[in-house]
């Protein structure tokens, strides 16, 4: 008697067998546990002191995209944190009202809700406390707090939006901070091929990327700092690149040897789209970033113990790059809010 098995059924059985074998292998080498540590959280954390509301987030979005918040009326928060540029600006150094620019690169806002404190040196305890830094900074948006409140109070649309968010139309600094922070906490990483892979789709990323993931969590030492769903542990590290008095968190803790030249570990979400790299935009490509880490950076007392020559092979570097590229999410164009005043 002949037994006929359809090609589709045979293919399905083979795929099931491959997944079973992959799962068994992961259990034996711990890969499944490592992958689980990168799964996205189910919810965004909003603090009790500033809970989420639809109207508050909508107000925050209006403020975020509105150049009214700058003296010249030409610069908005989105100028440095453009959703089309993975919530950064693609520049080595941020540029505000002063064409000379700012000393540091504008960090992406992706997953900002998960990585407080903020700032390359960590001087801001939370998102709310960041808000007026760029608004009032002379080289950035260059607008005083009283001037901003006067401008917003003269706009009927903002009076209505504040009333909707807070119950009355009073416009105050704490309310501006709370609204902007609420919107910014909603800026989270989209689903990437990597996310689909760790949820069980073995076809979502290439074999090279899977090998790169092993390098990332092993020989490359990347996960020592770039861990968890946002690919950062929120720490401050000297990776052996900063020099010439560019001491980062060391300014806040001058007696700490380990915090000299230490800067915030950034998220790696969308990292392939966010060149140039480092706090000062000094590294042009991901390939160059990998080479920098492979060499180990400047050897000094403050250098992180995770930073040392790695002796990666050419194939390992290629695989690591392939993995990093899987962290890019497809994102639809973010619709701009109405700015009618």
Image (cartoon, helix red, strand yellow):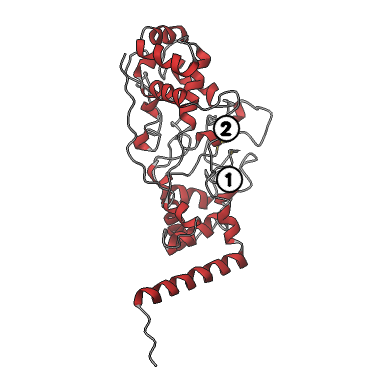
Number of numbered callouts drawn: 2
**Image quarter for residue 32?**
bottom right
Marks 2/1: CA–CA distance: 15 Å
Kindly check if marks 2 and 1 are in contact, taking CB atoms under 8 A apart as contact: no
Q: Which element type, helix, strand or loop, lies under badge 2?
A: loop
Q: Which residue is drawn at 41% across and 71% down?
A: 12
Q: Which residue is drawn at 52% across and 23% down?
A: 130
Residue 233 percent across, percent down from the top left: 59, 42
Can residue 70 be seen here? The reply is: no
Task: Judge whether 322 appears above or below 332 on screen.
Answer: below
Question: Which residue does the numbered mark 1 point to in the structure image?
Answer: 225
Question: Which residue does the numbered mark 2 point to in the structure image?
Answer: 116
Upstream in sequence: badge 2 or badge 1: 2
Q: Which residue is drawn at 34% across and 25% down?
A: 337
Mark 1 Cα-neighbour bin, 10 Å: few <14, some 14–19, many ≥20 = many
Can residue 167 be seen here? The reply is: yes
Decide if residue 173 is on the left or right side of residue 64. right
Mark 2 Cα-neighbour bin, 10 Å: few <14, some 14–19, many ≥20 = some
Residue 79 percent across, percent down from the top left: 36, 26
**Of all residues shown, which one is farthest toward the front?**
1
Residue 89 percent across, percent down from the top left: 37, 33
Q: Quadrant of the C terminus?
A: top left
Task: Judge whether 42 appears above or below 69 on screen.
Answer: below
Q: Residue at x 51, y 59 (%)?
A: 312
User: Which residue is more in the foreground, 113 or 92?
Assistant: 113
Residue 2 percent across, percent down from the top left: 38, 90
Which is closer to the viewer, label 2 or label 1? 2
């Amino acid at each position: 008697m002949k037994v006929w098995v359809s090609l589709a059924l045979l293919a399905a059985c083979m795929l099931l067998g491959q997944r079973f074998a992959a799962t068994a292998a992961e259990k034996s080498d711990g890969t499944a546990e490592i992958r689980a540590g990168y799964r996205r959280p189910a919810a965004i954390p909003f603090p009790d002191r500033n809970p989420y509301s639809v109207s508050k987030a909508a107000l925050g979005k209006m403020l975020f995209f509105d150049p009214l918040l700058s003296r010249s009326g030409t610069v908005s928060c989105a100028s440095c944190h453009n959703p089309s540029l993975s919530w950064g600006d693609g520049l080595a150094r941020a540029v505000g009202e002063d064409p000379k620019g700012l000393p540091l690169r504008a960090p992406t806002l992706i997953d900002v809700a998960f990585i407080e404190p903020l700032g390359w040196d960590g001087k801001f305890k939370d998102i709310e406390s960041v808000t007026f830094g760029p608004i009032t900074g002379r080289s950035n948006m260059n607008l005083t707090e009283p001037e901003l409140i006067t401008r917003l109070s003269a706009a009927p649309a903002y009076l209505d939006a504040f009333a909707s968010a807070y119950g009355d139309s009073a416009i105050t600094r704490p309310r501006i901070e709370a609204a902007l922070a609420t919107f910014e906490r909603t800026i989270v990483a989209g689903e990437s091929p990597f996310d689909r892979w760790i949820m069980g789709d073995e076809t979502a990323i290439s074999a090279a990327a899977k090998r790169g993931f092993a390098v990332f969590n092993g020989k490359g030492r990347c996960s020592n700092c770039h861990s968890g769903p946002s690919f950062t542990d929120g720490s401050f590290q000297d990776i052996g690149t900063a020099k010439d008095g560019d001491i980062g968190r060391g300014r806040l803790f001058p007696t700490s040897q380990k915090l000299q030249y230490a800067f915030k570990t950034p998220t790696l979400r969308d990292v392939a789209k966010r060149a140039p790299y480092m706090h000062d935009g000094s590294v042009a490509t991901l390939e160059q970033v990998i080479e920098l880490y492979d060499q180990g950076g400047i050897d000094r007392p403050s250098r992180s113990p995770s930073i040392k020559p790695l002796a990666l092979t050419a194939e390992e570097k290629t695989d690591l790059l392939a993995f990093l590229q899987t962290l890019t999410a497809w994102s639809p164009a973010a619709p701009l809010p109405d700015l009618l005043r």
